[in-house]
Amino acid sequence: MNFIDKIKDFETIDLIKKANKLSLKNNFLTITLERAIFLSWWCDKGNCKFCYMSTQKNKISDPKKAKRKINSILAESELCKRLGWNIEFLSGGYKSFTTEKIKKIATDIFTISNEPVWLNIGITEDLEKYGEEIIGITGAIETANPKLQEEVCPSKPIHEISHMLDRSKDLGFKNAITIVLGIGETPDDIDYLIRYIKNHRIDRVIFYSINPHKGTEFENYPQPASLYYAGVVATIRLTFPNIEIICGTWSDNLANIGILILSGANGITKFPLFKMFGTKYGKRVEKEVYWTGRKLKGTFTDEKKLGPPESEFNSDLNKYLKRYINESLKNKFL
């Protein structure tokens, strides 16, 4: 019986046990806190049917107003460094920033964090313009079912994403893909995902569960069952023992964290950092990791790690650091 049959036959507990054993054997003992840093809330495509940005295109009269201030982005990256959080990737909708501007932002973040960053900026032909400030390129595949992907993300053809990833690998970068679970795929589609990972030399898979945003076609969709989510993750861990797996869950589904880690996740993501820091929700994240027997890289509760409101790198960041620190502290008793 293969992995897909086991998921369909609800034998996920066996999968999880085997995935956990493999993770321990491979010394995957540290769990990272990951944070995507958004560059803009505008996307020129704006028609992925589950995406929050698809609800904004008709509301924003001037796309420039949706761009974040550069110093705000850099201050956020400095605070992530202080707290021990990894930057999951830099993300921006199509045509939100030029390649030159994105490269400059990535270079400045590299200076702050001393770590190259991942990019998730859509299909781009300008990969050769990036250098040591970038560790890898993320292709937003979004679903493991190619026919569903064509329907849900009509302006992001898989063959174009695949071509970008193949060029990325040839240029010496790492490759990642994003997969959203709960938008209509089935366990049978895992076979396609496995082939895709092999064919395009994927180093990192980032799983999310659907977040039903109001105003999208998916606003009334339930998030996927925790055991289904865990079964998919365990299958990928067992098929690709050394791949990096990041799992996203939402603040209303924190109980997923423990089981996803036992299923093979190396990191967790999709948290509103400044709203959850020091709260019962932040504490819950840390407890979920603790009870898996893993060590957490970074903190969701140690306010001393927030540090002073003065930047170590650029005084122009100070007012943004102060704002983020204050926002992180104001909810600590909730």
Image (cartoon, helix red, strand yellow):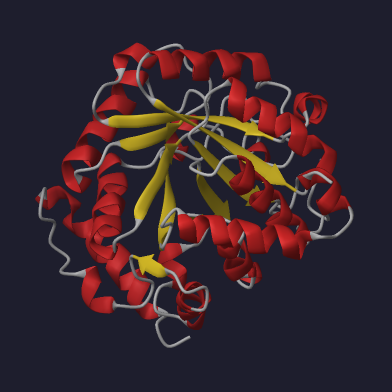
Residue 133: % across, % down: 25, 30
Residue 149: % across, % down: 75, 29
In the rendered structure, the answer to whether residue 241 lies left or right of residue 171 reads right
Rendered position, 333 above or below 104: below
Q: Which of the 4 quarters of the picture holds residue 153? A: top right
Q: Residue at x 77, y 60 (%)?
A: 12
Residue 211: % across, % down: 69, 54
Residues 294 and 306: in front is 294
* Residue 217 shows in the view: no
In the rendered structure, the answer to whether residue 318 lies left or right of residue 190 reads left
* Residue 98 shows in the view: yes
Q: Residue at x 42, y 80 (%)?
A: 331
Q: Which of the 4 quarters of the picture holds residue 249? A: bottom right
Residues 219 and 4: in front is 4
Rendered position, 274 above or below 25: below
In the rendered structure, the answer to whether residue 139 lies left or right of residue 196 reads left
Residue that lies at the very extreme toward the bottom in this rendered image: 333
